[in-house]
Amino acid sequence: MKVTQNTTVLAEGKPAATIFDAASISNVGPFGLCTTLTNPVVASATAAALGVLTPQPCIPQTVSFIPNGNKVLIAGKPCLAQDCKLMCMYAGQISITLPGQMKVQVS
């Protein structure tokens, strides 16, 4: 993931993400394989393989993050937390498996 909405607030030396860092390609690049038949590329490849599911490279068509109710704001926008999910228009979801910040300070 690449943070583009915020370049001033840092967490452990890296830009902190908000739920608005959700754009396809500019924030979330291609990765892994897509297996959902609602993706036209997967559906076409599967049809060409006579109905055998044929995963294709994942090029996310992101919609938005589902926030977790986090009240921490960065420049007035909810910060991105590990339990937020990024929804894809092809009915998939992207989860954060390795957050950039591991330390949490409670006051």
Image (tube, rainbow, N blue to C red):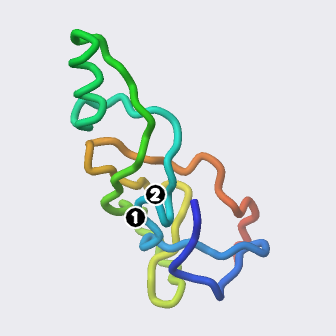
Left or right of residue 73, residue 14 in this image: right
The answer to which of 4 and 101 lies nearer the viewer is: 4
Q: Earlier in the sequence, mark 2 or mark 1?
A: 1
Q: Residues within 10 Å of mark 1 (few under 14, many from 20)?
A: some
Q: Secondary structure at mark 2?
A: loop
Q: Is 97 placed above or below 14 here? A: above
Q: In the image, is 91 to the left or to the right of 55?
A: left
Query: Relative to residue 42, is residue 62 depicted above or below?
Result: below
Viewed as shown, does residue 73 lie left or right of 63?
A: right
The three-letter amino acid code for the residue at tag 1 is: Pro
The quarter of the picture where the N terminus appears is: bottom right
Residue 92, quarter of picture: top left
Give residue 93's mark: none
User: Badge 2 is on which residue?
Assistant: 84
Which residue is under mark 1?
67
Please report the residue visible at 41 percent of the width from the left and 60 percent of the height from the top. 24
Q: Quadrant of the C terminus?
A: bottom right
Q: Position of residue 36 (x, y in %)?
A: 30, 31
Measured from the top left, where is residue 74 in percent x and y? 54, 84
Residue under the image location 45 percent in, 89 percent down = 76
Mark 2 near mark 1, Cβ–Cβ under 8 Å? yes
Residue 96 sits above or below residue 21 on the image: above
Q: Label 2 amino acid?
A: Cys
Q: Secondary structure at mark 1?
A: loop
Q: Nearer the viewer, residue 33 or 80?
A: 33
Question: On the image, which quarter does residue 47 sit in?
Answer: top left
Q: Position of residue 89 (x, y in %)?
A: 26, 50
